[in-house]
Amino acid sequence: MNRMRELIDKLNEASRAYYAEDREIMSNYEYDALYDELVRLEAETGITMSDSPTVNVGYESVDELPKERHESPMLSLGKTKDRDELKSWLSDKEGLLSWKLDGLTIVLTYEGGKLNKAVTRGNGEIGEVITANARVFKNIPHQIAFDGRLILRGEAVIKYSDFEKINSEIEDVDSKYKNPRNLCSGSVRQLNNEITAKRNVYFFAFALVQAEGREFALREEQYVFLKQLGFDVVDYVKVNSSNILTEIEGYAHRITDYDVPSDGLVLIYDDIAYGRSLGRTAKFPRDAIAFKWQDEIKETVLRDIEWSPSRTGLINPVAIFDPVELEGTTVSRASVHNISIVRSLKLGIGDHITVYKANMIIPQIAENLTCSDSLIIPDACPCCGGKTEVRSIAEAESLYCTNGECPAKKLKSFALFVSRDAMNIDGS
């Protein structure tokens, strides 16, 4: 019970940071490992606490935007990393296999052919109203050829190509965005939709909730209907027991070049009536399941930690390790983010570590096999030699240079001043 409580507190804190505050305090790999451990303990003890993340969905949204209760709860999906388990789940039925997009889930409501309302997922029951922002998404139709009430769900995302372009125009490392999901979340929830419009947010529909006066027997019929109305629908393929493993492998090959952020796949029964007949649990619908990629993990040796000072004085730790092949590319560096993560990994030069690519894209340290905990946190800035200090901000400890005259601060502040998002000075 003590371990379960510890796991619940850690997981809830990580979810709160991720969904409500747009920051990450642990890797996806670590979260999944802790979550799976909690599931095993709950099965072993037969006890599930009321605040367990296995029965609760998300956290309350922030207060800057109006809130509204969803007409029907937006549940999470059960998940697996086992391809054969996905095949077994489908059994002799037909299903639709699609990308599990990594953005912000949005519910759109159309009345009389016009977009009437857009609400974020929020905590699954109450979301934020972001209608004005949704109207400037790159690919949402303002008017459709359907006069009845239409409700659909989809994912708002910022493509990798747009994310990289936005980041390339930001000179200061502190000001760069960490990943497309965080940038999308902040863009969708702006109070000024002019900012949203500049961020190139896209919407991909993945579920039709209601189409007044229309009935459908198959999910694919709903997707075709939404496409006819002008919506972009998440890429999908129809599968059965004979081709599902081949199609999963096809997605695995495509993920490395896919421009839309994705953290897995979703499998849903094509037969709507059959899916509904299965009902739901407290947290999961039984007509769909999520598949998360089995991370390719390689062992290597940590050779150095590069300490990189920035405009604000924050000194970012970057792990340098022996090159390894991951998901088709050679990697030798991974951000360690902050001192809290450095300490939790108990790093030391020469340690044997395992590394992987989060969502098959971003290099991360998974585990430290040696745990020497011998890494010395520098007490002097690598740029100016000034004194450093560890500061606790937003429940995470980070290293800072205290020298106000540090050349790195001055140079990067000047770079920010002349950058496109500031004075936009062009020329040499």
Image (cartoon, rainbow, N blue to C red):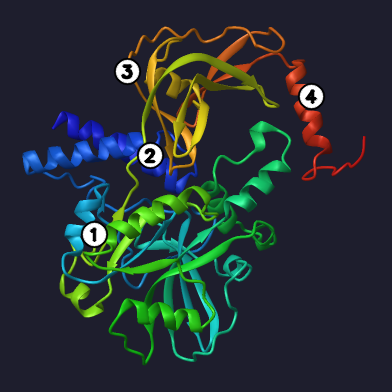
Q: Earlier in the sequence, mark 4 or mark 3?
A: 3
Mark 1 and mark 3: Cα distance apart in space: 35 Å
In the picture as drawn, the residue positioned furthest to the right comes out as: 428
Amino acid at dot 1:
Phe
How far from the left and from the top, in percent, is residue 341? 43, 24
**4 vs 2, front mark:** 2
Mark 1: few, some, or many residues within 10 Å (few <14, many ≥20)? some
Mark 1 and mark 4: Cα distance apart in space: 51 Å
Q: Residue at x 60, y 56 (%)?
A: 190
How far from the left and from the top, in percent, is residue 109? 47, 77
Judged from the image, the secondary structure of the residue bearing numbered disc 2 is helix
Name the image quarter holding residue 115: bottom right
**4 vs 3, front mark:** 3
Q: Total number of numbered labels?
A: 4
**1 vs 2, front mark:** 2
| Residue located beneath label 1 in the image | 284
Mark 4: few, some, or many residues within 10 Å (few <14, many ≥20)? some
Q: Residue at x 51, y 29 (%)?
A: 331
How far from the left and from the top, in percent, is residue 84? 21, 52
Quarter of the picture containing the C terminus is: top right
Name the image quarter holding residue 245: bottom left
Do we see residue 69 in this rendering? no
| Residue located beneath label 4 in the image | 411
| Residue located beneath label 2 in the image | 28
**3 vs 2, front mark:** 3
Q: Earlier in the sequence, mark 1 or mark 2?
A: 2
| Residue located beneath label 3 in the image | 369
